[in-house]
Amino acid sequence: MELTREIVGGEPYEYVPIGRYIVRAVGVCGGRPTFKYTRIEVAGALDCVAAGESLNSIVEAYAGRVPLEALQEAIELASRCFMGSLPELVAS
């Protein structure tokens, strides 16, 4: 994936897109995945989902800075990573 450069609020913003809403931004949260244009880490939102919070309550908690579609993308990407890391079953 290539580094994308933008000017946001007059400041340079460099990131590697992981999805439409999720990025790894240079110098932001140690490079851990965040929701684009925020310092909100994806892992924290997924922790809320795992704890049983509704997606709508998470959106409200982030004061609309993270849209519902971004949370859905995070869940989808996490699911793909999980499925891709499962060991192969070998018939004996």
Image (tube, rainbow, N blue to C red):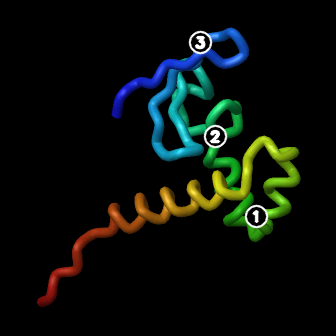
**Mark-to-mark CA distance, 3 and 2:** 17 Å
Q: Nearer the viewer, residue 54 or 20?
A: 20
**Residue closest to the far left:** 92
Q: How many marks?
A: 3
User: Crowding near pointer 1: few (<14 within 10 Å), some, many (20+)?
Assistant: some
At label 3, which amino acid type do we have? Pro
The percent coordinates of residue 27 (x first, y second) are 56, 18
Viewer-nearest of labels 3 and 1?
3
Residue 7 relative to residue 4: left or right? right
Q: In which quadrant of the rendered view does residue 60 lie?
A: bottom right
Which mark identifies residue 55?
Answer: 1
At 51% across and 32% down in the image, what residue appears?
Answer: 24
Q: Which residue type carries mark 2?
A: Phe
Q: Earlier in the sequence, mark 3 or mark 2?
A: 3
- How far is mark 3 from mark 1, CA to CA? 31 Å
Horizontal and vertical percent position of residue 71: 66, 56
At 70% from the left and 38% from the top, the residue drawn is 40
State the separation of the CA atoms marked 1 and 2.
15 Å
Indicate the secondary structure of the residue bearing disc 1.
helix
Which residue corresponds to the image point at 49% horizontal and 19% vertical from the top-left?
A: 5
Q: From the viewer's perspective, is residue 88 above or below residue 59?
A: below
Q: Is residue 49 above or below residue 25?
A: below
Per the image, the residue denoted by label 3 is 12
Q: Is residue 88 left or right of residue 24?
A: left
Q: Residue at x 87, y 45 (%)?
A: 63
Q: Is residue 51 left or right of residue 4?
A: right
Q: Give the residue type that dot 1 points to.
A: Leu
Closest to the observer, 86 or 18: 18
Earlier sequence position, callout 3 versus callout 1: 3
Residue at the disc numbered 2 = 35
As helix, strand or loop, the secondary structure at mark 2 comes to: strand
Q: Quadrant of residue 2?
A: top left
